[in-house]
Amino acid sequence: MQLKKITFGILLFAIFINTATAQRGYNNRIKTYKTAYITEALELTVKEAESFWPIYNAYEEEYRNIKVVKTRQLHKKIRDAGGVDNLSKSEAEAILNEFLEIDIKAAEVKEKLKKDLSGIISSKKMIKLFSAEQNFNKELLQRFRNRAGNPNKN
C-alpha cells in the first residue's frame, strides 16, 4: 500500500513538473496524466508497471494509428469529394467498408493487448484498464468542455 502511494506520488510529481514546462507540449501533459490515472486505477505494483507500460505504450501507438489516423484519412476523402452526398454509390460503399475495417483492426489490436498483458496483470485489472481508459477520456472531454465554456479557468 505504501509503495502504491509512493509510485502515485512520483507520477503526480511528474505531472506537475511536466505542467511547469509547457514548452514540452499539451499532449505530453495529457499522456503523463493518463499514465498516473491508469496506474492508480489498476493499482499497479512497481514490478507490474515495469512490464505493463512498454506493452501498453506500444498498443496505444498502434491503436491510435488505426483509429485516429485512418479515420482522419477517410474523413478527408469524404471532404475532398465535397461531402457524403457527393459520393457515388460505389465510393460510399468502399468508404463504409474501410470504416468497418478500422473497427475490426482496432479490436484485433485490443485482443493482442489482452494476450500480451495476460502474464503481467490479471483479467480483473484488464477490465479495470478498459474502464479506466473510458473514464479518463470522459474526464478529459469534460475538462475541454469546461474550458470552452469558461476560458478563464485553468
Image: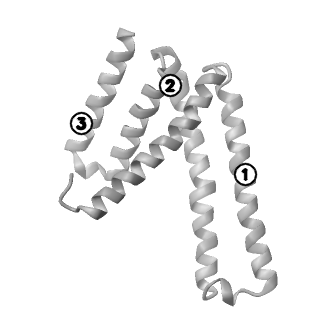
Q: CA distance from mark 2 to mark 1?
A: 25 Å
Residue at the (57%, 39%) spot, across then down = 58
Mark 3 lies on residue = 16
Where is residue 27? Give x, y as percent. Answer: 37, 50
Residue depicted at x 39% and y 32%:
36
Q: From mark 3 to mark 1, how far is it between C-alphas?
A: 36 Å
Residue type of the residue flagged with mark 2 = Leu
Q: Which mark is residue 42?
A: 2
Residue in the foreground of this view, choosing between 54 and 121: 121
**Are the residues flagged by discs 3 and 1 in contact, CB closer than 8 Å?**
no
Residue under circle 1? 105
Under circle 3, the secondary element is helix
Position of residue 108 relative to residue 68, above or below, is above
Nearer to the camera, 116 or 86: 86
Closest to the observer, 18 or 111: 111
Residue 133: mark in rendering: none
- At label 1, counting other C-alpha atoms closer than 10 Å, the crowd grade (few under 14, some 14-19, many 20 or more) is some
Q: Secondary structure at mark 2?
A: helix
- Quarter of the view holding residue 55: top right
Amino acid type of the residue that numbered disc 3 sits on in the rendered structure? Phe
Quadrant occupied by the N terminus: top left
| Marks 2 and 3, the one that precedes in the sequence | 3
How many other residues sit within 10 Å of disc 2, few (<14), some (14-19) or many (≥20)? many
Q: As drawn, is 30 to the left or to the right of 114?
A: left
Earlier in the chain: of badge 2 and badge 1, it is 2
For the residue carrying disc 3, how many other residues have a C-alpha within 10 Å: few (<14), some (14-19), or many (20+)? some
